Image (cartoon, grey):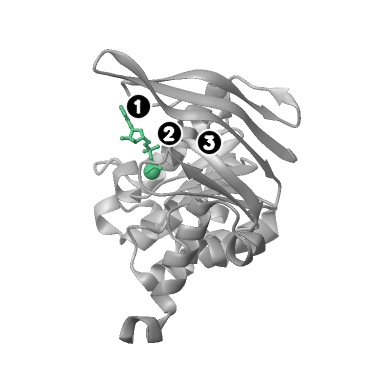
Amino acid sequence: MTSSTLAIEGISVETARHGSPLVLVDNVSLILGAGEVLALVGANGSGKSLTCAASLDVLPPGTRMTSGSVSIDGSVLQRSMLRARHIATIMQNPRSAFNPVRTMQEHARETLSALGIPKAEGDQRILQAIRASGLDEPERLLRLHSFEMSGGMLQRMMIALALATEAPFLFADEPTTDLDLIVQREILDLLDHLKRERRLGILLVTHDMGVVAKLADRVAVMDGGRIVETAPVADIFLAPRHVTTQRLVEAHLSLYNLSGVAA
Ligand SMILES: Nc1ncnc2c1ncn2[C@@H]1O[C@H](COP(=O)(O)OP(=O)(O)O)[C@@H](O)[C@H]1O
Ligand SMILES: [Mg+2]
């Protein structure tokens, strides 16, 4: 598929608290191009996950989208149609995405048959996608259940399922937060490789500015449900304009400022 631009426009999400409406996401717009990583950053609770969920029409109970649309190359699409077909997703806890009584093969066939892909083609696609995700022995892995695999392997399997759908965009919501540091680095390298090789457009949700520095091309900063700054990654680190961005960058740099810790 050769979609080149995903535009999320004017997304707002509300909940009801003590009987009155409370805005959780306030008029958020984002643009993501092919072959680009857009990092969506901000403190816990700033509205990053709800922005993604609203865009894909999978908001949790108790919340509702009050405005907004999503378009690809200028055509507004029904949000439920975007899932898998145009936008694949990976999440923080890959283990929770798999049903423990089913094999990887069953998960793969379900995902691909829901897209109308014939079984033989789907089986071929998943074998290739598993290899492209850096896992060996795909035939053996497809017979495994999630409890027989490590967190890193499961996150690679989530990425393999995403690749097998051939969706041009990927939403990755805190994809490395639950993984140990070495596996984190491997998954980030894999995403970087897929961005370059497949021109995948990636919306990378994270609160980790180290991840941003490694992977992002552009950065959107959220605070209290709003986007407060959007800029190329170099500007975010070298010339942050909004106080929220400045604090995120300072907190990140202070981790490396060992003389500051000693003083
Ligand atoms: N199902 C829900 N019902 C009510 N409020 C919610 C629900 N889910 C999230 N929220 C609230 O919406 C805000 C944004 O949440 P979220 O998008 O998950 O933040 P982030 O992903 O940036 O950590 C938070 O204040 C959170 O408490
Ligand atoms: Mg979140």
Q: Residue at x 43, y 60 (%)?
A: 208
Q: Secondary structure at mark 2?
A: helix
Q: Is mark 2 within 8 Å of ligand 1?
A: yes
SS of the residue under disc 1: loop
The local crowd at label 1, few if under 14, some if 14 to 19, many if 20 or more residues have their Cα within 10 Å, is few
Which residue has dot 2 on it?
50
Label 1 near ligand 1 (CB < 8 Å): yes
Alpha carbon of mark 2 to alpha carbon of mark 1: how far? 8 Å
* In this view, the mark in front (2 or 1): 2
Q: Amino acid at mark 2?
A: Leu
The reply to whether dot 3 and dot 2 touch (C-beta < 8 Å) is no
Q: Nearer the viewer, mark 3 or mark 2?
A: 2
Task: Return the residue at label 3.
Answer: 119
Give the number of the mark in front: 1 or 3: 1
Q: Work out how far the residue at label 1 is from the one at label 3, CA to CA, in angstroms.
A: 32 Å
- Name the kind of residue labelled 1 in the image: Pro
Task: Determine the residue positioned at 50% across, 31% down.
Answer: 113
In this rendering, position of residue 241 left or right of residue 250: right
Residue 86 visible in the shown view: yes
Q: Label 3: few (<14), some or many (≥20) within 10 Å?
A: few
Residue 60: mark = 1
- CA–CA distance between discs 3 and 2? 34 Å
- Amino acid type indicated by mark 3: Lys
Residue 207 - label: none
In the depicted structure, whether residue 74 falls above or below residue 263: above
Q: Nearer the viewer, residue 181 or 140?
A: 181
Proximity of marks 2 and 1: CB atoms separated by less than 8 Å:
yes
Work out whether mark 2 precedes mark 1 in sequence or the reverse, and give the earlier one. 2
Q: Earlier in the sequence, mark 3 or mark 2?
A: 2
Quadrant that contains the C terminus: bottom left
